[in-house]
Image (cartoon, rainbow, N blue to C red):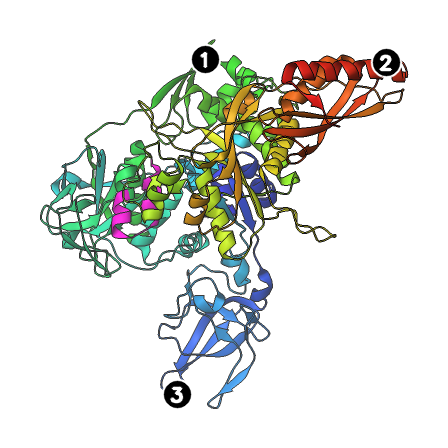
Amino acid sequence: MRLPYSWLKELSGIDWSPEETARRLTASGTACVLEMPNPEHFQNVVIGHITKLERHPNADRLVVTEVNTGDASHTVICGAPNCAVGQKVVLALPGANLKGELAVKPITMRGVKSAGMICAEDELGISADHAGIMVLDPDAPIGQPAFEYLGLDDPVFNLEITPNRPDCLSAIGVARELAVLAGRPYAPKIDPLHEGSRAASDFIKITIADSQACPRYAARIITGLKIGPSPWWIRRRLLACGMRPINNLVDITNYVMLETGQPLHGFDYDRFGSQEVVVRRATEGESFTTLDGKEHRLDPTVLMITNGHAGVAAAGVMGGLESEVADTTTTVLLESAYFDPGVVRKSARRLGLATESSYRFERGIDPNGVVRAADRAAAMMVRFGGGEVAAGVVDNYARTISPVKIALRPAQVRRISGADVAVPFTETTLRGLGMDVTSGDTLSVVVPTFRPDITREIDLVEEVIRVYGLDNIPVSRQNGGPLYTPTHRHHTIKTDIRNILIGLGFEETMGTGFAHAERLQKIDPGLDPIRVTNSMSDEFGVMRTRLLYSLLLSAGNNVRHRNMDLAIFEIGKVYLKGEKAPLEPEYAGVLLTGRPDGVYWKGKAFESDLFELKGVLAALAEGLGLEPVSLRLEPAPGYDPAQSVAILCGGQVVGHGGLVDRRICRMFDIKQDCFGAELELTQLIAPERARKPFVSLPKFPASTRDLAVIVDASVTAEAVLNEIRAVGGGLVEAASLFDLFTGEPVPAGKKSLAFSISYRAADKTLEDEEVDRVHGRIVEYLGQKFNARLRE
């Protein structure tokens, strides 16, 4: 919304500069961009007075005028049809450069010299009107620079009004904000309204058929009006606000809407069609032609203003063509109403229209400001249209909307803000915002109906704090207070997983959450997925139950584009049926295929396998500060039974993974092996362990021994490593597997495991005999535990 600085200054009484005003508004929650005027294009453009006019001797459509600018008289040729003696006009003298594109210089036109140009509004760049020259008010001062007189030196504020602040969709609303920020009392001037003798109820009555859609409808009657142009100051403000002036009556309804926030509509009473206003829903298929000349077929979602027989306006959106104010209008039926925001929103969408009126009604206007706005417009119509206002206002308030009463504890303002906000400041602020405040230990606050956004105590606290100034709240160097919400591990673990996997060379994918029912059934045959009503295609027919589906879908798209080497992951929800409501657990999934690490310089290429997947999981667990990861052979849907594993952390199953079933891969056009894992986030949080304590660097050397044993094929390397560490105690600093061998000369059903064991003491250098004793105990215990024997 656009508003000129001078208008806001006049209403609020502030003495701030435009820049300071914009800063204060933005800091209080109303974002504001200041548009400063550009006087360059108005050099040598002044106010002139046409003192003489005669026909051009050599052109039928041109006239030769004498224009007085105070210090000189200029001969100017003009072709506008509305040019006349006695007019005050805008004269561009030689040297002017209008809009930066039209240079004015002396010319000779058909034998007559012309020393300037009498301007139309479009030539000055203030509107698109080129119907004739711009005719100014009779009291316009001759010789004054046009830039000053026209008020084009007035900065304009471009305001971003949030949807919850309909009160600021008006000059009065923004001025109220400025006044309270400046600590000034705010009392808008009310023009007196002089009424005639005949009652308005003699002209019209109002019937509301749907009080939920239209709680209030008021009307005034103004007779004896004369259509004409509005005074320049009204037109200037309308233009500054981005609205096109039309005539005095229409301009006044628009002006009052911009001033008060209350949309108004004027009907030509003589063309209205009856003496009754009926507010009702449209009937199915009802025809209605709006002011823009377009015909619409309606349905009951549209609320209509009718004359009891036919529609004359779409309530809150746009008037009808048949009853619009025209050049012959002498009596106006002035509408001022409150319509339900949701109803107007639906009507506007149904009609495909977005107007200044619907914009305000959709956000909620003041139901108790309806008559006040009608009175303001009626007084202005009498002043600038020469009419008379019928006595009284016809007001049907079918459903009363009352102000909200809220209790406010001053201590709550201080507690939430963290600032020492004084009680008198709180009371003064709320009163300045238009609220009634009753003092006490707990303030009783009556919120006016022009603030529908304030319904709770916390809303009042917010109002006080934003006026107090967020910059004035002391800085706190610790997290705390009633508004502090600690970060939950459930949220931070996702960021940690993302950072770890990206550091390992993975790329993140983001699935839609939807899946193809038949493909998903192959991956997860045991579950009945949630079906999507009216899905766009079969590809989006159900909600996914596994992240593996989305990972394979992404991998398939890459493989089809010859991107064969992938390391990808996704963090997201799966969707499962629950007893009462759907369940949405979150998982982290990884997928490896091809050679993500590329080809080594020696030419060897290592395909992804289960061991690489385990390494990724181990690095992830270590990065998250979890217990070490172990794998246990265990069938899982979607994976090859021979290489399907349960993923354990601290003895607890946190997910499943392994080699993806090759038949499933082929469904996604993937002909190479894929290794995946799916980890449930809630399970990853549970086994977190304490952070490792700091350990100083060792002072004494280590002694390394290799140990190769033959064990049954069913014995895992991890089980052997656990026993080595347990038997060796504090002297075993590290132990790792460096070789696995099967085949001759190792007997069938057996395998050879080779380990590297590092021994070190913290307080001395170990002797060979000490290392040999510990090493021997380990060999002996492995023989007893696993029937292991040393490999020769």
Residue 654: x and y in percent read 52, 25
The answer to which image quadrant residue 122 occupies is bottom left
Q: Nearer the viewer, residue 131 or 361?
A: 361
The answer to which image quadrant residue 701 occupies is top right
Q: Which mark is residue 439?
A: 1
Q: Earlier in the sequence, mark 3 or mark 2?
A: 3
Q: Which mark is residue 336?
A: none
Q: Earlier in the sequence, mark 1 or mark 2?
A: 1
Q: Is residue 707 left or right of residue 307?
A: right
Q: Nearer the viewer, residue 98 or 745?
A: 745
Residue 491: x and y in percent read 54, 28
- Picture quarter with the C terminus: top right
Please say whether residue 631 is one of the residues in the magenta stretch. Answer: no
Q: Which mark is residue 770?
A: 2
Report the amino acid beneath label 3.
Ala
Q: What is the distance, in whole Å, between disc 3 and disc 2 at their CAs?
A: 124 Å
Q: Which residues are magenta?
A: 346-365
Q: Is residue 42 left or right of residue 242?
A: right
Q: Are marks 3 and 2 in contact (CB under 8 Å)?
A: no
Q: Are marks 1 and 2 in contact (CB under 8 Å)?
A: no
Report the amino acid beneath label 1.
Ser
